[in-house]
Structures are given as structure tokens and as C-alpha cells.
Image: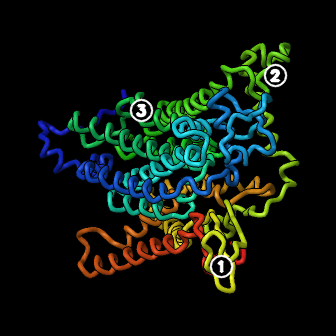
Amino acid sequence: MSPQPVAIDSPSPRLLRDVLPSTIDKLDDGAALRRDELRSWIVTAVLVVIGFLIRLVNLSRPNRLEFDETYYAKDAWSILHFGYERNWPSNADPQIAAGTTDIWEKSAEFIVHPQVGKWLIAVGEHLFGMNSFGWRFASLVIGSLFIGAVVRMARRLSRSTLIGGLAGLFIVVDGLSFVMSRIALLDIFQAFFTVAAVAAWLADRDWFRHRLADHLRQHGALNLAGSYGPLLLWRPWRLLSGVLFGLACGSKWNAVYVLACFAVLSLVFDYRARLTAGARRSAFHSLWREGVPHAATMVVLAMVVYLLTWSSWLFTQGGYDRQWGAQHPDDPLVKIIGAPLASLWQYHKEIFAFHTGTWIAHQTHTYQAHPFGWPVIGRVIGIDAVNDIQPGVDGCKAVNDTCLRVISGVGTPFLWWFAALAVIAGLFFWVGGRDWRFGVPIIAGAATWIGWFPNADRPTFYFYAIMIIPFTATVLAMILGKILGPTDAPPQRRRTGTIIVTAVTVLVIANFMFIYPILTDQLMTRKAWLLRMWFRSWI
């Protein structure tokens, strides 16, 4: 017979609060979150709206396909009409800019990324047409919601609306997040769904621990006294996390690294929750009774959602490789799973071969950037540029100089550098101070970064780091929270902390305002542009 929870005779709610703080309060430590729930949502909404408004200004400029929009905006338009990507003529871009948008070819295009982001871009195109505003609208909306997702994630980690709001503010004024919210690329969608998935995962952690605390309250128990406790098979937040991870992977594949890390991390956190509740040796049973099944459910659900994101390809006939199964009826895989799914598997094999093959490994690009330098902005990405605008042309008033218009994908430098230092400090709080809250964003950020190193022999680009900044900015906000100190700290400590936090925040905002012209295609002289190119590697 398993041990029973240690009970308290005739417990009252007040008595339980007095004698059970060490176990119940450790499990149910989200009281601060519940006290200011409304205020936190107001903060979230305000930051999202501010982010939306400053990103909306001149969203349609330049009125042409820029950078990799030439792939994804056109893919989205053909998906909207046919359910799969089609090829376009080589001179399609200027014709689209001129308003001719039905010039796709009949042949299917070989694409190397899934369809979720392109379907979202297609929504904007459906609402506003195949124009620069239409194909950028979805990035604007999701990029604004991205700010809110960071607020919710950081708030739940820190147990502070102030820190959550500070992390969200950093994303509002991050140059890379700003630019990626104003261009029809896939990375902002992947980043949003990944952060939202981690936020849901954290909500599941709190939900699970809260249920264990409720079990002790209901039984008037000090702890589980070595028993296993309630078997919690229904985990709604964990299921939502799986769905969101599936959508993240359905935007770009490398979100799978974060999914894998958090599937493993869920085993550790479930075990630790049972141990905190007093399960003792029975806590090990959580690994196979709940841990593995729930982790597997999250992964399998993500896979199912990912498969569903290919529905339009599966239920139409003209996509690339769509007829492979019909053309290979004797293939064992076709016989086992059917021609459509076998065709999709074959397609994925070809996509994987493209990403890992020798051809791409030998390619070069002007703006390629090794992942090692991403956290400190070792190399920026040029999105669009019109150079050598002569005085008197396009409003240029340069004297002994020329003008230009550029859009550079560059993070707000002081934000990224402070965040890199904060991660180092966060490692000490996590490992040395055993503060799990720092471990979550550090692991998530590392998973989005380190996974690129094995593929660093092919061209990689700084804008991929949009997956890193939500987690490092969260760590920075949490470190600033440490500097600020608790509300009951000595007044001098709070004053000093407030000065430091305010100074860092103001410096980051001012830095964003300074680089704003190179993020937004504004006319400037070459000298003004060079003032913002602080390193030779940025040019």
C-alpha cells in the first residue's frame, strides 16, 4: 500500500495557510499573477497597439517586392488561388509592382519551407490585394502579437507585470523585430508561434503545480508523504503548446529544436513538481506515468498539426511532387500510407536534401553571417537599398554628398549587447543560484541559436536571430528586475536600481530612434547612413 498524504485534523482554510506554506506555497506560487491579471492584460494590449502603430507607418513603402519577398509573397498568392506554389516568369516582380498579378506559370514550384507563413501572408493579400501593403499586412499583425506573446511569457516567468512589460517594450523598440514585422518573410511567424508555444508550456507548468496544491488543500495534507498523488491526464495548456509548436514548425523547420528541448524539459519539471509536493521516490514514477506520455503527446500533436498545415497541397493535385506516389504505385511506402502521404514524404526528403546538400554548402551571399556573431550583431542584413541618389533627385539636399534609401535588418545594438551580457549573468543565477526561471529562456534561446552551427557551412543570415531576441530580451528584463530589487527593499537600493533600469531602458529606446531611418527606407545622406554603420562588417 502506498503512503497516504499526511493529514491535519479538522483543518480550516486559515490553519492550512498558517501551517502549509512550505509545500503548497511552493507549488502554487502564482498568486502574484492572479492579483494583477487585469492590469497585466492592459499593459500587454497597450504595448501591442504601440508596436502595431509604429510598424504600420509607411508599411507599403517601398512599393515593390524586396529581398526574399520575391519568393514568399508570390508563393502566397499562388497558394491562395491554387492551394500550392506555382512558378513565375523571371520578369514577374516589376509586373507585379505595376499591378499585373495573374502571370504565374502552370508548373509547380519546388519550395523549401512549409506553408503556414505563406498562408498567413495570403490572408493579407486576400484582404488588400497583391500589393506591398497586402503581402506585408500579416507580418504587421503577427509581429505586433509577437510583442504580446513576449509580455505574457516574461510575466509568467518573472511573476511580475513590470518585468513582462519591460521585455515587451524591448521587442517594441528592437530594430530586427521591427523590420521583420514589416516584410513578407516567414521568420516572424515562426518566432511568434515559438514564443507562444513556450508561454503555453509555462502556463502548463503552473497549471500542473496548482492542481497538486489543490489536491493537498482538499485532503488537508502537509504533503504527499511519499505517495504519488493525483494522476493528471488532462493538460490543456500542454496540448495548446503542442499545437503552437506544430504551427511554428509549419512556418520553418528549425523550430523543432525548441520543441525537442521543451519535450525533455517537461519531464524534468513534472518530476520536480511531484518531488516538491512530497512524492519522494514516487516522483520517479511521474517519468513514465505522466511525463513521457504528456511529452510524447505534445510532440505527436505538433506533428499532426504540422501535417494538417499541408492540407491544401494534399487535397489538390498540381503541387510539386504531388503525383510521385501515383507514379510509384509499387513503392512500399505508397502501399503502407497511400500515394498522397508518400508523395509528401518524398517531397520532404527533397527539401531536406536541399538544405543539407553540397550545392547549397558551396553557395555564398553578400550578407551571409555566421551564427557565432548573431548575439552581438556581427553582420547585418541588407533588405533593400537605392544608392547614389544625386542632389536634387527624390528630394535629396546633400551638399558634396549623395543620398540613399536603405532598409537594414539590424537589431537595436544596445539592446542586443545588454541582452548578451544579461544571458551571462542569467547563467550564474540559473546554475549557481538554482533559479529555474532563468533556465527556461536561456535554453529556448540556445535551441534557436546553436541548432544553426552544424549548418554554418551554408549561407546563414542574421535575420534568423529573430528567434533569439525574445528570449534574451526576457533574460535582460529579469536581470533588470534583480537590479531594481523587491518592493520592500531599502529605499536607497530601490532608488539606485530605478536609476539603472531607467537609464538602460532610455538608452535602448534612444538607440532605436537613432537607427530608425535605416529601418524604414528614409531618405538620408551617405554621411548620415555611415553614422549608423558602426562597424565595417555592417556595411
The residue depicted at 23 percent of the width and 34 percent of the height is: 219
Q: Secondary structure at mark 2?
A: helix
| CB contact under 8 Å: marks 1 and 2 | no
Name the foreground residue: 23 vs 370: 370
Residue 471 x, y percent position in the rendering: 51, 57
First reached walking from the N terminus: tag 1 or tag 3: 3
* The image quarter in which residue 486 lies: bottom left
* Disc 1 residue crowd, few under 14, some 14–19, many 20+, Cα 10 Å: few
Q: Nearer the viewer, mark 2 or mark 3?
A: 2
Q: Is residue 212 left or right of residue 325?
A: left
**Camera-nearest residue between 533 and 494:** 533
Q: Residues within 10 Å of mark 3 (few under 14, many from 20)?
A: some
Identified at 70% across, 50% down, the residue is 68
Q: Which mark is residue 235?
A: 3
Amino acid type for the residue under numbered disc 1: Leu
Say left or right for 201 vs 44. right
Real-space Cα separation, disc 1 to disc 2, in angstroms: 52 Å
Which label belongs to residue 512?
Answer: none
Residue 376 found in image quarter? bottom right
Q: Are marks 2 and 3 in contact (CB under 8 Å)?
A: no
Going from N to C along the chain, the mark reached first, 1 or 2, is 2
Dot 3 amino acid type:
Arg
The residue labelled by disc 2 is 324
**Local secondary structure at mark 3:** loop
Which residue is pictured at 43% across the width and 46% down the height? Answer: 202
As measured in the structure, the alpha-carbon distance from the residue carrying label 1 to the one carrying label 3 is 53 Å
Picture coordinates of residue 337, whole percent (x, y): 72, 17
